Image (spheres, coloured by chain):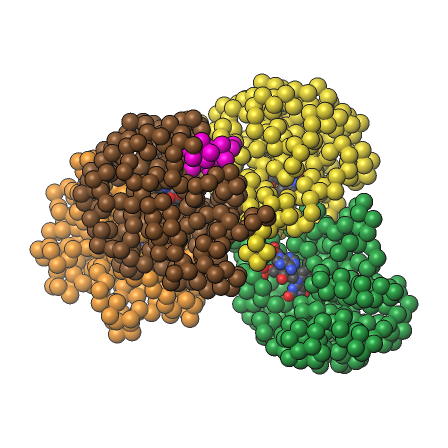
Chain colours: A yellow, B brown, C orange, D green
Amino acid sequence: MSLLKVDLPGLALKNPIMPASGCFSFGKEYSQFYDLSKLGSIMVKAATLHKRLGNDTPRVAETKSGMLNAIGLQNPGVETIIDQELPFLASFDVPVIANVAGSTIEEYEQVATALRRSNIAAIELNISCPNVKEGGVQFGTDPEIAAEVTRRVKQAANVPVYVKLSPNVTDIVAIAKAVEVAGADGLTMINTLTGMAIDLKKRRPLLNNGVGGLSGPAIKPVAIRMIYHVYEAVNIPIIGMGGIRSAEDVLEFLLAGASAVAVGTANFENPLVCSDIIDDLPFVLNKYGFDSVTDAIGKGHVDA
Amino acid sequence: MSLLKVDLPGLALKNPIMPASGCFSFGKEYSQFYDLSKLGSIMVKAATLHKRLGNDTPRVAETKSGMLNAIGLQNPGVETIIDQELPFLASFDVPVIANVAGSTIEEYEQVATALRRSNIAAIELNISCPNVKEGGVQFGTDPEIAAEVTRRVKQAANVPVYVKLSPNVTDIVAIAKAVEVAGADGLTMINTLTGMAIDLKKRRPLLNNGVGGLSGPAIKPVAIRMIYHVYEAVNIPIIGMGGIRSAEDVLEFLLAGASAVAVGTANFENPLVCSDIIDDLPFVLNKYGFDSVTDAIGKGHVDA
Amino acid sequence: MKKLETRVMSMEKIAQATYQCVIHVEIDLLQTIKPGQFVHIKVGEGTEHMLRRPISICDLDFENETMTLIFKVFGQGTKQLQTLTAGDLIDLLIPCGNGYPIDEIEASHVLLIGGGIGVPPLYYLGKQLVQKGIKVTSVLGFQSASDVFYEEAFKTLGDVYVATNDGSSGTHGFVTDVIDTADLSGDYYFSCGPTLMLQAVETKLSDTPGYLSLEERMGCGIGACYACVVKTTDGASTKKVCQDGPVFKASEVQL
Amino acid sequence: MKKLETRVMSMEKIAQATYQCVIHVEIDLLQTIKPGQFVHIKVGEGTEHMLRRPISICDLDFENETMTLIFKVFGQGTKQLQTLTAGDLIDLLIPCGNGYPIDEIEASHVLLIGGGIGVPPLYYLGKQLVQKGIKVTSVLGFQSASDVFYEEAFKTLGDVYVATNDGSSGTHGFVTDVIDTADLSGDYYFSCGPTLMLQAVETKLSDTPGYLSLEERMGCGIGACYACVVKTTDGASTKKVCQDGPVFKASEVQL
Ligand SMILES: Cc1cc2nc3c(=O)[nH]c(=O)nc-3n(C[C@H](O)[C@H](O)[C@H](O)COP(=O)(O)OP(=O)(O)OC[C@H]3O[C@@H](n4cnc5c(N)ncnc54)[C@H](O)[C@@H]3O)c2cc1C
Ligand SMILES: Cc1cc2nc3c(=O)[nH]c(=O)nc-3n(C[C@H](O)[C@H](O)[C@H](O)COP(=O)(O)OP(=O)(O)OC[C@H]3O[C@@H](n4cnc5c(N)ncnc54)[C@H](O)[C@@H]3O)c2cc1C
Ligand SMILES: Cc1cc2nc3c(=O)[nH]c(=O)nc-3n(C[C@H](O)[C@H](O)[C@H](O)COP(=O)(O)O)c2cc1C
Ligand SMILES: Cc1cc2nc3c(=O)[nH]c(=O)nc-3n(C[C@H](O)[C@H](O)[C@H](O)COP(=O)(O)O)c2cc1C
Ligand code: FES
Ligand code: FES
C-alpha cells in the first residue's frame, strides 16, 4: 500500500509502524504471531558495550492505563547482539534500528563503532533511559551533554542517528534543538516518564529498583504535547511513541508532527497490535480524509 | 476517629482528605452530596487579583485514566471570593485553604494581602498552573523565581503558605528545597502534567488552549515518585495529590511521604469520593497494619 | 441532584447508531425532573473513563417508574454505554441542569426545533406543553432517513415536519428551510441541536422569544469545575451549561 | 503459542476467594499443551489493565474440549476475571512457558508439593504421571481449611497430605512439616508455590532431584521484555520465567 510509505533518513519505510525498543526484544518471540516483514521497521532492545544483567526483580508493575518498568538495560552486549540476535532479523524484509545505550560517552561511541559491522539501517541513541543508576538519564536532561553524545556517536556511526528524548525535563524543545544542531538525523520521542508505585504490604517501592519508567496510554497526552512543540522547533523528522495502541492513536501522532511511530507497551496487551494497526491505518486515514501518511504529518498544527 | 487526625502548619485536620483546588469550586455544589464538615480541609479554586474569564472552550478532554483541562484560572477575583464565596464555607466545621495565583509576583502578593481579611486557614501558592499564557508556569520551573515568589507571599500572608509544585520540571527536588529555604510552611504536589490531545476531525488540538493539564489516575506514578524524592530532601510537610480515587491510593501517598492528600479529578467520576475515602480509610489502615495516619507517613521508604 | 445507581430496563436500537435506553427511577425522584434536564452517566467501572457523559432526559413514565434516554454512539463512551442491557447497573447524577422554564412562559403555540441528538429532550418538553394546553409544532432535522427517530411519537403532540440533509426523508435541507417553506411561527420556540443549527434558528426566528439547549464538553456536570462555560451576550461574564443551563434564553448567551 | 479469543464455559467458587474457570479450547490446541504451562490473560477490554495475568493450566478435558484454570482473587485483575460467566469471551495467550519435562525423567515415585495457588498446575501434571504408570504422592499446603481445594481430585491420583498454617485441616504447619512427619520421599519432586515454600522444599529435599515452578511479575509473557528473569545458580546469567520456565530444575536457578 503505497499510501502508507514514508521516507526517513536511512529508512525507506513501507509503513510508519514499528515496535518500540525494549518491548520487542530482537523480534523472535513476536515472529510466532505474524510475519515481521509486515512491519515498517523494528527498534530492537538497547545494546551496551558489555553484557548487563539488569536490575533485580520485580521489574514491572501495572499502573492505571500504563505500566512501570525497570529492566535496567539487560542485554548480552553489542558483539553478541550482532553475532547472535541480528542475523535472525536479516531474514525479514525490514530495516532494523539499533538502540544504543551506555554509562559514559565513550561507551556510546564504542557501541556505535561496533555496530558498523552490522547490517542495521539506523541507530536510536538512547540518552533517556531512566532505569540505570550510573548514567543514562543525565545525558538526556542537559542540552549540552545531549549534544555532545550526539556529536560523538554521529562520528562513530555509519548510519543515520535518531536521538531518543527523555520527557522528564523542563524544556524538551531546548534538548531537541541542541541535538539537531549536533547532527542528529532524527528524533524519537518520548521515552518513559519516571514514576513509582509503592507496595502497600511490603511498605517499599514495588519495583526493586525503586523508580521505573511509566509507559502506555496514560502518557499519550504528554507525548503528543512534546511532539507538537518539538515539531514546530526542529527540521528533522520525529518518530513518535507513547501509549499508541490503535490506528487512531497513530493518526493523532502524525497530526502532532511525527513522521512515523513506535508501539511499545501495547505489544504486551496484544502481541498482534502492530500488525492490526497496519491493517487498520488505511481505513482510518481515509475516514479522516487523508490520502496518505505523508499527507497527515503535522496537519494538527493550527497554522498547518 | 482520632486515628485519622493530622496536624500541619495552620491545619488541625480531623482527617487527611481534602478536595483539590479547581475541582471543587467553593464547595457549594458538593454540599448537595454530603456534609462538607466531614472533610479534613477544602482547597478552593484559584484566586487572582481581578476577575478572569478563563480560556475559550473546549476546556476539558478525556484521556485514558485521566483528563486534560485548560480552564485558565477563571475566577471572580479575590475580593468577590472573600465576600461572596468564602462565607458559605464558614458555616461548616472545616479549615479552608485558599489557592493563590497570579501573572506577576506583585499580583501574588496582592492576592495574599487581600486574603488577610478572610478566615482562611492556609494559602496554597499556585506557581504551577500550566494553563495561563502570561505567567503562572515559569514561576514553578525555576528554583530562584519560585523561592522569590514564596518569600514575597510569606511576607504578605498572615497564614501558613503551602507551595504547589509543578511536575513539569527536570529536578523537582531542587525547586522543593528552594521554596523550603524561602520559608514555605509546606508543599502541595503535584499539579498537572502538561499534555495535549488532538481532534482528528478538526485537525487541531482538542482544547481551545492547545495544551492542558493532565490529571487523574494516569499520573499517579509520577506523583508518587516526586513525593518520594522530595520527602527525602525537605523537612516541611507535603500534601500529596495526583490520581487519588480510593483509600488504598491515599495510603500509597502516605507511605511515599505525604502527610495529607487532595483529591481532584476523581470528584468528577464520583462526587462522593472524598466522603467514601474518609469512610474507608480506617479499614484500609487497619488492613495494612497501621494504627493511624501519622503512623503511615513516610513508611514506604526503604530506610524508614 | 443525587448520585444514583439503578438498573437498565431495556436498550434498543431505534435508528442508525441511535439507541433508546429505558432506566428504572423511583417515582419521588421522577417527580422532581423538569423537561430539558440531563443525567451525567459514568462509563464502565474502572478508571479508563474518568469523565461522565451528559445525556438529556427524553421521557418519563410515572406509572412504570422509568426514564427514557436516547443517544447516538459517537465515541468510546457512548459505544460502551450501548452495550448495557436489561438488568445491568448504571450510575447517574440525576437530575442535572435547569430545564425549560415552562411554568414561566405565556404561550398558545410553541415551536419545537430539534436537530439529531438534540431531538430527545424536546419530547418530554412537548408532552408537558400539550398537557398545559399549549399547541405544539415540531421540526426535526436529521442527516438522513436512516437517522430519523421519534417522528411518530412527536405526531401524538401535534404537527411534525422532518428535514434531512440529503432529502431522503421529509424536506431536503435544514430545519430552517422547513420554517421557511412551511411558514412556521409560534409565540415561543424551544430548540436543541448542533451549534450551527442553533445559530441559524436564532437568526431566522430573531423576532420570536426562544430558549436554546446548549452542548459543551463537561467535567463535573454539577457546576464545580468551570469546564462548560458559555459567554453571556455582553461578553462580560460566563454561564455554566451544566448548572445555569443547558437551557438558556436565546438572547442571553453567545453561540 | 497463539492469541486466542474463546468462551468461558463456567466460573465456580471452590474455596475462599478461589475460583475454578472452565474455558473452551479446541482439541488441536489442547493437544499441544504440556503440564506446567500457563495462559496469559487479558483483563477487561479497555486500557485500564495493560498487562495480562499469568494463570497456570490446571487441567485439560480432551473430550469436552475444555481447559480448567484455578485462581485466587488477589488484586484488581483477578477480581475482574472472576466476574466472567458462561458465554463471556476471554482473551488468552496460550500455551505459554515450557512445562514439566515428564518425558525426560525416569522415576517410579514422584512427590507433588504445592502451596496455595501453586497447587493447580500440579493436578494435570499428576494425571499425566499416573498415566505413565508413575506413583504420585501429593502434599498440598494451604493457609486454612477454608482455602483447601482439589483434595478429592488429588486423591484419585494417589496419597494426599494436606497441611494448613493454622491447623484447621490436615497437618498443622507447612508442607515441609508433612514431609518430615510422614517421612515422605520419592525419586523426583515437582513443586509449585510461594518462594518461601520453594526454598524450604529445596533445602529439605536437597538430595532428591526436583523441578520448581516459579512466579515472577510479567510484562509480555512470551520472552520479549525481560521483566520476569531469575538468576541462574552461578549468578552469571538469567533465565526468563515466562519462556525458559516457569518450570526449572531446582539446581538451575537462585530462589
Ligand atoms: C447537556 C447535554 C445533553 C446531551 N444530550 C444528549 C442526548 O440526549 N443524546 C445524545 O446522543 N447525546 C447527547 N449529548 C452529547 C453527548 O454527551 C456526547 O455525544 C457524548 O458525551 C459523547 O461521548 P463519547 O464517549 O461517545 O465520545 P468521546 O469523543 O469518546 O468523548 C470524549 C469526551 O468528550 C465529550 N464529548 C464528546 N462530544 C461531546 C458533545 N457533543 N457534547 C458534550 N461532550 C462531548 C464526552 O463527554 C467525553 O468527555 C448531550 C450533551 C450535553 C452537553
Ligand atoms: C507462571 C505463573 C502462574 C501462575 N498461576 C496461577 C494460578 O494458577 N492461580 C492463581 O491464582 N495465580 C497464579 N499466578 C499468580 C497470578 O498471576 C497473580 O495472582 C495475578 O497476576 C494477580 O493479579 P491481580 O490483578 O489480581 O493482582 P494485582 O496486584 O492487581 O496485579 C498487578 C500486577 O502484578 C502482577 N502480579 C501480582 N501478583 C503476582 C504474582 N504472584 N505473580 C505474578 N504476577 C503478579 C499482576 O500480573 C499484574 O501485572 C501465577 C503466576 C505466574 C507467574
Ligand atoms: C519493558 C520496557 C522496556 C523498555 N526498554 C527500552 C530500551 O531498552 N531502550 C529504549 O530506548 N526504550 C525502552 N523502553 C521505552 C519504549 O521504547 C518507549 O519509548 C516507551 O515505552 C513509550 O512507548 P509506549 O507507551 O508505547 O510503551 C522500554 C519500555 C518498556 C515498557
Ligand atoms: C478541572 C481542573 C481544574 C483545576 N484548577 C486548579 C486550580 O485552579 N489551581 C490549582 O492549583 N490546581 C488546579 N488543578 C489541579 C488539581 O488541583 C490537582 O493538582 C491535579 O488535578 C492532580 O490531582 P488529581 O489527579 O486528583 O486531579 C485543577 C485540576 C482540574 C482537573
Ligand atoms: S461541567 Fe463542571 S462546571 Fe459544568
Ligand atoms: S514477561 Fe516479558 S520476558 Fe518474561
Compare residues B100 and A170 and report the one nearer the observer.
B100
Quadrant occupied by the N terminus of chain A = top right
Q: Is residue B53 above or below residue A206?
A: above
Instruction: Determine the image quadrant of residue C63.
Output: bottom left
User: In screen coordinates, is A84 left or right of B223?
Assistant: right
Q: Residue furthest right?
A: D106
Q: Position of residue D48 (x, y in %)?
A: 52, 53
Magenta region includes residue B176: yes
Magenta region includes residue B109: no
User: In screen coordinates, is B139 left or right of D202?
Assistant: left
Image point (80%, 47%), residue name: D235
Q: Position of residue A168 (x, y in %)?
A: 53, 34
Image point (64%, 32%), residue name: A136
Image point (30%, 66%), residue name: C67
Q: Is residue A215 above or below residue B29?
A: above
Q: Position of residue B229 (x, y in %)?
A: 53, 40
Quadrant occupied by the C terminus of chain A = top left
Image point (31%, 43%), residue name: B122
Instruction: Determine the image quadrant of residue C55.
Output: bottom left
Is residue A159 visible to us here?
no
Compare residues C67 and D148 and report the one nearer the observer.
D148
Compare residues C154 and D47 and report the one nearer the observer.
D47
User: In screen coordinates, is A82 left or right of C94?
Assistant: right
Range of magenta residues? B165-180
Q: Position of residue D103 (x, y in %)?
A: 87, 65
Is residue D255 visible to us here?
yes
User: In screen coordinates, is A146 left or right of C74?
Assistant: right
Instruction: Determine the image quadrant of residue A115.
Output: top right
Numbered label tally: 0
